[in-house]
Image (cartoon, rainbow, N blue to C red):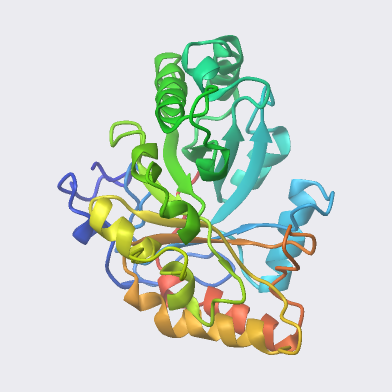
Amino acid sequence: MRLIAGLAVLVAGACATACTGTATSGRVPGGGAGTTPGACAVTDKLIPTCGAWWGIAPDVFSGRGPIRAVDMAERRMGRRADIVHVYHRGGELFPTAEEREIAKGPRLLLVNWKPALDHTWAEVARGDVDKRVDRLAEHIRRTFPGRFFLTIHHEPENDVREGGGYSPADYVAMYRHVVTRLRQQGVRNAVTVMTYMGAPNWAAKPWFGRLYPGDDVVDWVAFDPYADDRVRDFAGLVDKTRPDAPGWPGFYRWMQARFPAKPIMVAEWGAFERRGAPGFKRDFFESVQRQIADYPQIKALVYFDSPLAPRGDTRFDTTPGATRAFAQLGRLPRFTSTPVPPS
């Protein structure tokens, strides 16, 4: 893979080089330059050669605009985000003007797009929304030359139905068609992400392995785990197992075996409030500090920050202890070593 900075050439598939390593230079938590400029770089697939990206989906479901939400989240956690996760559906055009302003940080956009809620996957795959895709491609070419992450119809597992246009084969065909169409229309700056739910019960389905669209259209693999009542620490989050999914090794272990050459993104993660355990979030964030080094293939950690998440409050600063632990986590050298490239 060609480095943006032109510093080196990484052997294709050598994730042991691009997807591991510890920080060799640092950044001021607010985003300033580090002490050894050029020691850490970013590949053309937005893989940091040192450490991992620190990201956030800020204040989700609050109704605040993205600029205000990002500003408030960064003030609360005491540093600038490397990645900002935003969501779009159907014919919405992105990046929006506000999202383009956010990217000037510099920050990387992670755009989560469901191309069609009014068509099946099979219909999208056969071209029924090509005009929508082409209109988006023209918008991206005209307004946003910078690289960005793009995940297409994330967490497809609970939408799968055999027949009716929502089979695993239909998902693969839809994903491949959209990526190929965007590329044909001149979009060369989208770094594609395949995002799984991260839930063992869905991973145990017999069709689960057939959802992957293919290495030629997927640059990163991702999953969206949450710290439910079964989870005690970060290790239990990223390698979650369940009694009703016997034999499932956990998502990180599965991804290591299935995608050894791909960087892994935790595209959403969050800790819910626990009744009778006011210190849980603090303890959980402290476990991430202790354990993140055990997961070198994770190259981006993007927190889902919301008071109104479907299963509870995932805000990282609901107690003073949680606030301190989360801020300390974001200041680890692992998350401050590679500067975000200008958009």
Dividing the picture into quadrants, the one containing residue 245 is bottom left
35 or 139: nearer the viewer = 139
314 versus 57 height, above or below: below
Asked whether, in this view, residue 109 is left or right of residue 24, the answer is right
What residue do we see at 69% from left, 26% from top? 92
What is the number of callouts on the image?
0
Q: Quadrant of the N terminus?
A: top left
What residue do we see at 33% from left, 41% from top? 44
187 versus 216 height, above or below: above
What residue do we see at 59% from left, 26% from top? 115
Dividing the picture into quadrants, the one containing residue 300 is bottom left
What residue do we see at 79% from left, 64% from top? 307
45 versus 38 height, above or below: above
In this view, the residue farthest toward the left is: 11
How far across and how far down the image is residue 340, in percent? 47, 54
In this view, the residue farthest toward the right is: 63
Dividing the picture into quadrants, the one containing residue 235 is bottom left
How far across and how far down the image is residue 343, in percent? 51, 41
How far across and how far down the image is residue 156, in percent? 52, 40
149 or 125: nearer the viewer = 125
Q: Is residue 40 visible?
A: no
Q: Is residue 260 visible?
A: yes
82 versus 169 height, above or below: below
